[in-house]
Amino acid sequence: MMRAETKSPRALALELLLRCEAAGQYANLALDSALGRERDMSAVDRSLCTALFYSVIEHRITLDYIINGRSSIAPAAIEQRVRMILRMGLVQLLYFDRIPDHAAIHEAVELTPKRSKGFVNAVLRSFCRDGKRVDYPDGKAEPVRYLSVRYSVPDPLAESFVRGYGFARAESIFAAFEKVGGVTVRVNTQRYTREAFITKFGGVAAKIAPNGVRFDDLSAVSAALEAGDCFVQDEASQICVEALGAREHERVLDLCAAPGSKSFGAALCMQNTGEVKSFDLHENKISLIRRGAKKLGLSNITAAAADARNADPEALGQFDRVICDVPCSGYGVLAKKPDIRYKDFSLAVGLLPVQAAILESASRLVSVGGVLVYSTCTLLPDENEEQINAFLSRHPEFEIEAFTVGETAFEGMVTLAPDTHGTDGFFIAKLKRITRNGKS
Amino acid sequence: MAKLQIRKVGDEVLRKVCRPVEEITPRILTLLDDMTETMRAADGCGLAAPQVGILRRIVVIEVEQGKVIELINPKIIATAGEQEGPEGCLSVPGRQGIVKRPKHVTVRATNRHGEVFEMSGSDLLARAFCHELDHLDGKLYIDRATYMED
């Protein structure tokens, strides 16, 4: 037997990127399992590998635009491995301030098979020689093409944002995705006030969510997470739970609950009293919710597998508050999941009837006077406002209700976005059931 | 001592099942010494007799520098856990692949003095036990690899 060679972080990132592209593996899962195997790799090398891996995915369209513009051979004739090496080299030249250009180029050439070393060297060096200039398409003449190349989003996604928000706002959102960093936790308020938590673990109070604390990364709170003193939840999702406004001794239903953070938030708002029922379609995710609840010391949560589209006839009108965070295209979380942008755009269309069906069935479970919250982590109006407007036109027994989170007042339908709120892109609608069947 | 020629993948001898050693003769002892020398010269951490063209159930392993483990007629008697990681082979030069193996392995074997002994190993040693014992049954890690790198 031979000892396996310890891989350099760049070589590992290259193999992973090639594998993800070929097999369409989920980026985060592929990376986690590969880093798990490289037990001898140092922390510095791990973080370089991680940063390279995600940056190449995030900027792929931009990088390919540069490569295709500078290649001496036909773009389609560039071998996949060589193209990936060029992407990795370019991403370092463009976005990695602490890696000197000559090092980025040298390492790229090192990884390249002999026959293509000259080619890789030429493309990267000519890019540096020209001052790393990128001639983006003209934003006025070709707005969609410009956004696509500049922010590395496929045309249909760029187009839908332009349609929904106009060119300037679309650019502002895409630009903000690149800047959103850090991670937000929700404090286990059964154990700590937010002030006490910050005193003990550091971090900065979230701007809107009253129990959120922001960190640059999770290293400062890994022990607190393990102990159940807090859990990871983006501020947008925390705001969504605040909109639900669960109170002590109420009955709350969380459809599409996994991994459970909204259930946990509601259960904490209820001071571990009353009842939170957490349903998710996928049986294997239910244990995730149970484990999380146990860790946080929450005994008012019961989790079970159920299809949110089929309302239990026994439970009709039984819940004070129902929340459904429906499956969606996910285009609000481009900052955290850079690979989501390349998903087949038409899949989002297939989700529309599912979302409508879940909203419909959720609405039947809400008691008169009760609250229904509908949320998504996307910014496409079709999945958001359009769904709610269509629902309201069918259901006069519901109306939109404004809400306040901490000191911030929201109208009943709100789209949170990275450029305006510094959160993930997220949609929340708070609806109130005013009568039994629409006739008051 | 002598350095032996290592057979490479494609050589039919690597695909044969080896016969047990019935008697520890001076020839067997010489073979053990030669195998260790060959393994070290090739910078390997394990070598099985079929890799040098001898169809006998004999293995040498050196996972920890200076601690050569000689196994005659070895058998895996217990395994536990699981590990997945990269592995290479002197008979498959220039390549490596990801292989799932047990995390802990116990083998029973005979030593060069004819005494039966048991030995347990974890991580790389457990991997080496599995990899080398596979050779004795004509198996190569490339048959088991989840995928090959490169």
Image (cartoon, coloured by chain):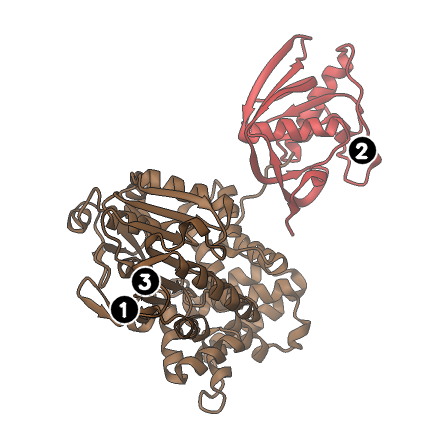
**Residue occupying the far bottom of the picture:** A141
* Amino acid type shown at disc 3: Ala
Q: Are marks 1 and 2 on the same chain?
A: no
Q: Which chain is red?
A: B
Q: Which mark is residue A401?
A: 1
**Is B13 situated above or below A173?**
above
Q: Position of residue B46 (x, y in %)?
A: 65, 29
Residue at 68%, 19% in the rendered image: B75
Q: Disc 3 and disc 2: Cα gap in Å?
A: 60 Å
The chain letter under disc 1 is A
Mark 3 vs mark 1: in front: 1
Gap in Å between the C-alphas at discs 1 and 2? 74 Å
CA distance separating discs 3 and 1 = 18 Å
> Residue A317, located in which quarter of the rendered image?
bottom left
Q: Earlier in the sequence, mark 3 or mark 1?
A: 3
Q: Quadrant of residue A385?
A: bottom left
Q: Position of residue B29 (x, y in %)?
A: 72, 15
- Considering depth in this image, is A11 or A113 the residue closer to the camera? A11
Colour used to depict chain A in the structure image: brown
Closest to the camera, between mark 1 and mark 2, is: 1
| Residue B69 seen by the camera | yes
| Label 2 neighbour load within 10 Å: few <14, some 14-19, many 20+ | some
- Could you tell whether B66 is left or right of A114 in the image? left
Residue A2 percent across, percent down from the top left:
63, 36
Asked which secondary structure carries label 1, the reply is: loop
Disc marking residue B15 = 2
* Left or right: residue A288 compared with residue A267: right
Write down the residue under mark 3.
Answer: A236
Q: For this view, does B107 lie left or right of residue A316?
A: right
Depth-wise, is mark 3 or mark 2 nearer the camera? 3
